[in-house]
Amino acid sequence: MRPMSAKIVSIIEETPTIRTFRLDMLDWFRSKPGQFVMAWVRGVDEVPMALSFDNGITVQRVGQATEAMFRLKEGDTLGIRGPFGNGWELVGDNILLVSGGIGSAPLAPLAEKAAAIGVQVTTLAGYRTKEEAHFEKRFKKCGKTLIATDDGSYGHKGLVTDLMRDIDLNTFTQIHSCGPEKMMHRVLGILDERKIAARSQFSLQRYMKCGIGVCGSCCMDPVGLRVCRDGPVFKGDDLLDSEFGKYARDASGRRIKI
Amino acid sequence: MKLNIVAGGLTLPNPTILAAGILGTTGASLKRMASMGAGAVVTKSIGAEPKYGHPNPSLVKLECGCINAMGLPNPSYKEFLQELNVAREAGVRVIASIFGATEAEFKEVAQGLPGASAYELNVSCPHASGYGMQVGTDPALVRSTTKAVKGVVKAPVWVKLTPNVTDITSIGRAAQEGGADAVVAINTLKAMAIDVDSGYPILGNVRGGLSGPSIKPVAVRCVYDLYEALDIPVIGVGGISSWADAVEFMMAGAAAVEIGSAVYDDIGIFAAVSMGLSDYLDRKSIELTDLIGLSHRVVKHETYEC
């Protein structure tokens, strides 16, 4: 598909570095939680963005493309291709979400859709510091929510994975995680120790060019799975003994240590 | 019917090959495509230094095919050698696609990727300034570049041709004179697309190349002309997405075919084409090699009858 023009109907400042863009695109766009779009800031770049709402993306300012997005105003348009990727699979009636930073984006709509059909949702959300906390209300509306911050300014002081120690992980029918790769790798390590990696799903990020499974930029070792098409959501046990947590490739294809 | 064939100095279990620039960035991905049925795989085009490529969008699916301007992103041969080896050590026939701005660079990259089953010279990328097509539209440069690479590697050397010339056979002849073991035809056709809401060209690089079903008739014609003009084999590529397309290319003169954009619909395309080909040969009670250039023989036969 060509990029479709989607007007920005509202911009919500979630934190000093994170904004949500709600887009006028529901006439032609249907997605499920965990899918993503390629968002094109014309004349600058096009980047993959998880859908944080049926019609929205939540963006952290990290580079040239997201800087350019932060300069956009309500009424401006983005070029949108998608939805792409597989999305989360809902398994059972009691799920745990483990979120780190902007990894909340694909998890919040999953929490809402799951809760809306009676699935019990528990969320562990980690942030760098209190002022970076976001989507807490969305998670709390869906069920029990525990917060951790790196500096202890809000909630538990430490890693979000610390919070996993105090709950019985075996009670969950499925565990969904998204966040920085090091954090997700720790989550997978904990689940693997308890022999429940097969009951987990992770949403991954890799450098993408085409977004449609053709170019090969986002392929993962050792199987060659494409994050844009075979993912971005992968089962935990498929990630064991993979490049996950070890390295990723940059835009040139060079391996970069995680 | 058996599908094994010798094409361009390579012995292949079947005549389907993964085209350059498609799912060829990592050794694991090349391995996966071979396991999906590709008789051989061509890597992403590799150069002497790391390149990040053009800004996105760099590949977009249009109504009639794909338009792309990747900009030759690659990690350099030094970094890519480990990827090549991952696939090679798994027994995959890997054809290294290489590019350079000079003869010396082509030689350096070819020598820097030892162990490839063959080398495919990318002298045909339509949208990387100083590389690709700027070499591939000049017969003298094609001849000397081919000769230079032939002088430093033992494996077969294929030359991938651009259709963006007045007479593709003159470039094909130059490759043959330079000692090429085969020519590969065709690379993408110069193209662009514009976003009608904003007026912005869609590709980050503005200009790019078209692939997919819409270029197939152009490619078939190029293969037909090259088969007639050259003594070396022609590898056909451009819009192949079914066994019938492969038959068509082989009848035009292709000794084997490369498949690229069609992996969008099905990464199992290689096995699907092979199965269809095999059934077709059974139905017709002919061998795979009978297909190669068949149309030329049919046309000549009819001409005599007139």
Image: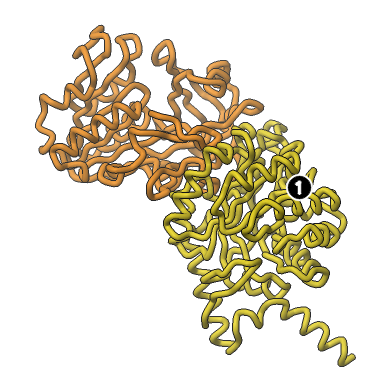
Left or right position of A7 against B177: left
Q: Is residue B108 left or right of residue A109?
A: right
Identify by letter the chain in orange: A
| Picture quadrant where residue A94 is located | top left
x and y percentages locating residue A170 in the rendered image: 11, 38
Q: In this orientation, does residue A29 appear?
A: no
Q: Position of residue A224 (x, y in %)?
A: 42, 49
Residue at image position (56%, 54%) is: B116
**Which residue is disc 1 drawn over?**
B190
Residue in front for this viewpoint, A199 or B141? B141
Q: What is the basis of the colouring in this image? A: by chain
Chain letter behind tag 1: B
Q: Position of residue B173 (x, y in %)?
A: 82, 62
Taking depth in this image into account, of B265 and B282 the one nearest to the observer is B282
Q: Amino acid at mark 1?
A: Lys
Disc 1 residue crowd, few under 14, some 14–19, many 20+, Cα 10 Å: some
Q: Out of A119 and B172, give the one closest to the viewer.
A: B172
The relative height of residue B133 versus residue A95 in the rendered view (above or below) is below
Chain depicted in yellow: B
